[in-house]
């Protein structure tokens, strides 16, 4: 079978070689579930937000990738056709506004719970790129959480 998605290609390379992947998947590097004064969206609202990073040396088209706050609903919010450049970052507001216009601010159809909940980024087809499971811990106001960010170039 020939892999059809970057996620499948990367996973198969890792399984076949049992080495560090030759490709890197986009991942959630940071999120804020209780944003009161840190980052306003285009409406001037301080919505929750999720930062996605492409650690790979090649661009990634996020079309079909998903974000979710429910493990039982992996395709809760689907990315439109936006490209994340090599080493690039994109912020998606978790506002409940459900905005998916490429080139404009992106907004999920869900908000994040300050008290903690499941959060995941999934590849097309449902493979988990990364997740906070069973849930991330309770969040402090205006303090972000996440995985370690890669060093700046």
Image: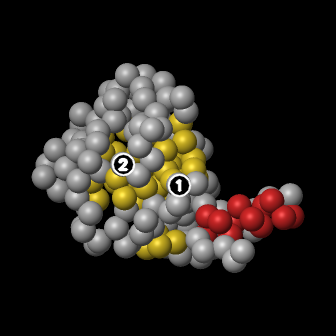
Q: Quadrant of the C terminus?
A: bottom right
Q: How many marks?
A: 2
Q: Is residue 49 left or right of residue 12?
A: left
In the rendered view, would you say 2 is above or below 89?
A: below
Work out whether mark 1 precedes mark 2 in sequence or the reverse, and give the earlier one.
2
* Snapshot quadrant of residue 106: bottom left
Tell me which residue sits at (49%, 44%) in the image: 120
Left or right: residue 45 versus residue 34 is: left
User: Residue 5: percent from the left, percent from the top?
Assistant: 58, 71
Residue 131 image-quadrant placement: top right
Q: Nearer the viewer, residue 68 or 106?
A: 68
Is 89 situated left or right of 76 in this image? right
Name which residue lies at 45% across and 61% down: 65
Task: Using the image as rendered, state which of residue 125 and residue 86 is in the foreground.
Answer: 125
Quadrant showing the N terminus:
bottom right
Q: Viewed as shown, does residue 90 lie left or right of 21?
A: left
Q: Can residue 2 be spotted in the picture? A: yes
For residue 113, above or below residue 129: above
Image spot of residue 50 (x, y percent): 39, 47
In whole angstroms, how far apart are the C-alphas of marks 1 and 2? 11 Å
| Residue at which label 1 appears | 126
Q: Give the residue number, with chain letter if any, for mark 2.
A: 76
Categorize mark 2 by other alpha carbons within 10 Å: few (<14), some (14-19), many (20+). Answer: some
> Horizontal and vertical percent for residue 9?
68, 70
Q: Position of residue 94 (x, y in %)?
A: 30, 45
Q: Residue furthest left?
A: 43
SS for callout 1: loop
Q: Residue at x 28, y 42 (%)?
A: 110
């Amino acid at each position: 079978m020939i892999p059809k998605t970057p996620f499948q290609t990367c996973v198969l390379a890792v399984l076949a070689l049992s080495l560090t992947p030759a490709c890197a998947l986009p991942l959630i590097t940071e999120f804020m579930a209780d944003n009161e004064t840190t980052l306003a969206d285009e409406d001037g609202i301080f919505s929750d937000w999720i930062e996605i990073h492409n650690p790979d040396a090649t661009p990634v088209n996020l079309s079909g990738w998903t974000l979710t706050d429910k493990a039982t609903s992996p395709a809760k919010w689907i990315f439109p056709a936006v490209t994340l450049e090599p080493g690039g970052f994109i912020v998606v507001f978790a506002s409940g506004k459900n905005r998916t216009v490429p080139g404009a601010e992106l907004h999920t159809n869900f908000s994040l719970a300050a008290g903690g909940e499941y959060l995941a980024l999934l590849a097309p087809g449902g493979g988990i790129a990364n997740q906070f499971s069973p849930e991330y811990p309770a969040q402090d106001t205006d303090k972000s959480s996440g995985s370690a960010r890669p060093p700046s170039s």
